[in-house]
Image (tube, helix red, strand yellow):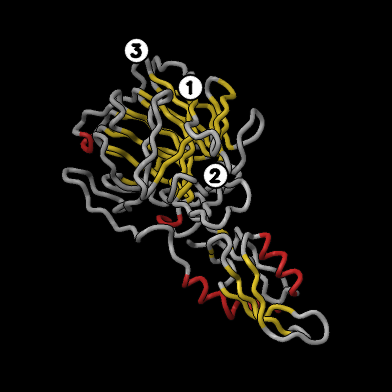
Amino acid sequence: MTIDAAAHPRPSGTRRIRRVLLVGLAALLAMIGYQAPVTASPPQAGAATTQPAGLYAPKGRPQAAGAPQSLASAATQFFYAQGADTRGSSHPTGAQATLTVHRPALRGDYHSLAELAVRSADLQDIVEVGWAVKPGLFGDTQPRVFVYHWVNGGETCYNGCGFVATNPALLGSVLPVGSQRQVVINHVVAGTDRWTISIGPPGAVQQIGYFPDSLWGSTFTEPDRVQVFGEVAAVSSQPCARMGTGGFPTATSGARIYAVSFLGPGAPAVNLATQAPTPAFYGVVRTSATSLRYGGPGAYPGVPPPGSACKVVVPYVLNDSRTVADLRVRQAGLVPVFTGAGGPGEPWVDSQSPAPFTEAAPGSEVRMHLRSGPIP
């Protein structure tokens, strides 16, 4: 996995900076993604020019609220906390919602995201927009803008596969943690009939681009259902990743999705029905007819145990005393192993393996070589 230094800041001090320079480049180059490298997708036949080509990676498709929830294949398993409503007899043109932006820790899983989706009556055609922490796709652990769509129940790819980016700078852009973003999906009949997608601070959205109706053979032209949800893609049935803020939601805390509404003349009022199929891992609390809080810690609120599929971050202990290094490594769920001679005064850590900020399985060893005397 790619670990952002901003998420795990280095210790201060010029001596430690010099140490980081000695190990940092090699460690960063050694880090790997959570999944096999993604590949650019070819344009779909008959689709508009694809900007950009788009990338394939795991993406889930939650069931309608109230329907049985099943996990995906053993390769990627999906977990949700969601709210949804249907249009009834009216004919809206789209939907909108406002999402709070977070940076949930993945701890070895593929992604954690939040989104707005509109779906067809048979639930097979979908347009989606939101933010995702997905290092295997984006190369870091920042929350970034994504779009996605499904055609007749078939998967496509992120940020492409026929999507026309009219504002490419917004597509895949980093969103500030703690901010709020209004997301809008609306069907437009003019020139190229299309599903337009917009995002921005509440009341100041900008269009990202659109999916042309030709991607669906012009058969998907109005939303039957609106859905808003958090989603985790995990490597096993015991998810490691946090969702939202990483804590279970209450009426006053947790990640928020609010101001959910249908769009268009005569659009019906939204009355969300909520669902959290795995409440031991992730929860949802309806706070009004148009808003909810969601999130959770996954299967392991604390340090994941040895033998789990989860990963933990190796702490930076270079130049720490043996006592401090021992405590920090144990707190991370790892086993300290020391080598090297002592001497006058308490020894300090001269080198460590694995390198700082990389990931390791819980219960694995961190080997540290000790030196004594002045720290250079």
Residue reaching furthest to the left: 45
Q: CA distance from mark 1 to mark 2?
A: 25 Å
- Going by the numbered disc 2, the residue's amino acid type is Ala
Q: Nearer the viewer, residue 169 or 262?
A: 262
Q: Are marks 1 and 3 in contact (CB under 8 Å)?
A: no
Q: Nearer the viewer, residue 348 or 204?
A: 348
Q: Determine the residue positioned at 66% across, 81% down.
A: 339
Q: Nearer the viewer, residue 336 or 150?
A: 336
Compare marks 1 and 3 and give the one earlier in the sequence.
3
Q: Nearer the viewer, mark 1 or mark 2?
A: 2
Label 1 crowding class (10 Å Cα cut-off): few <14, some 14-19, many 20+?
some
Q: Is residue 156 above or below residue 25?
A: above
Q: Nearer the viewer, residue 337 or 122?
A: 337
Circle 2 sits in a helix, a strand or a loop, which is it? loop
- Going by the numbered disc 1, the residue's amino acid type is Ala
Q: Is residue 192 visible?
A: no
Q: Quadrant of the C terminus?
A: bottom right
The residue tagged 3 is: 89
The residue tagged 2 is: 299
The residue tagged 1 is: 273
Q: Is residue 37 left or right of residue 131?
A: left
- Going by the numbered disc 3, the residue's amino acid type is Ser
